Image: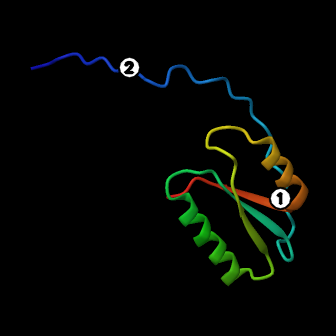
Amino acid sequence: MTALLTVHDPRGYPPAVTAKRLAPRLECLDGAVVHLVDCLFDNSEVFMRQLQAWFAEHLPSVRTEIVKPRESWVDDPALRERVQREADAAILAVGL
C-alpha cells in the first residue's frame, strides 16, 4: 500500500545568515587565558568541566575559566565584552 505523507517543519523559516571571518588563530596558548563558554545546553557544564580538566592535565600553563551567558539562545553583550576584555581566546561548547 502506497500513501502520501506530508511533513511540516515546526521551526518555520530560518533567518538569513551572514558569513563572518573567524578570529585570527593564536600562535601559542602558553600563558594564555581561555574562556570556556558554556552555552547552557543539557549536560554542557559536565562537558566544560571535563574540557577544563583536559587543559589542566595537558596544557597546565593555560588558565581556563568557565563562563556562562545569562540565558540560553539569547545574545549576551556583557558576556561578549567580558570575553574580549579578559581572555586571549574562547571556546564555545554546547555539551554532550
Res. 26 image quadrant: bottom right
**For residue 18, side relative to residue 71 (left or right):** right
**Residue 95 appears at what percent x and percent y?**
54, 57
Which residue does the numbered mark 1 point to in the structure image?
25
Q: Residue at x 66, y 72 (%)?
A: 52
State the quadrant of the N terminus.
top left
Residue type highlighted by circle 2: His
Question: Is residue 83 shown left or right of residue 57?
Answer: right
**Towards the viewer: 85 or 28:** 85
Q: Residue at x 42, y 23 (%)?
A: 9
- Name the image colouring: rainbow
Label 2 or label 1, whichever lies nearer to me, is 2
Q: Secondary structure at mark 1?
A: loop
Q: Mark 2 — residue?
A: 8
Label 2–label 1 contact, CB within 8 A: no
The kind of residue tagged 1 is: Arg
Residue at the spot 67% in from the left edge and 37% down from the top edge: 74
**Residue 40 placed where, x, y %?**
59, 51
The residue depicted at 60 percent of the width and 70 percent of the height is 49
Task: Tell me where residue 5 appears, x and y as whole percent.
Answer: 25, 19
How many angstroms separate mark 2 from mark 1 (CA)?
A: 41 Å
Q: List the single residue furthest toward the front.
A: 70
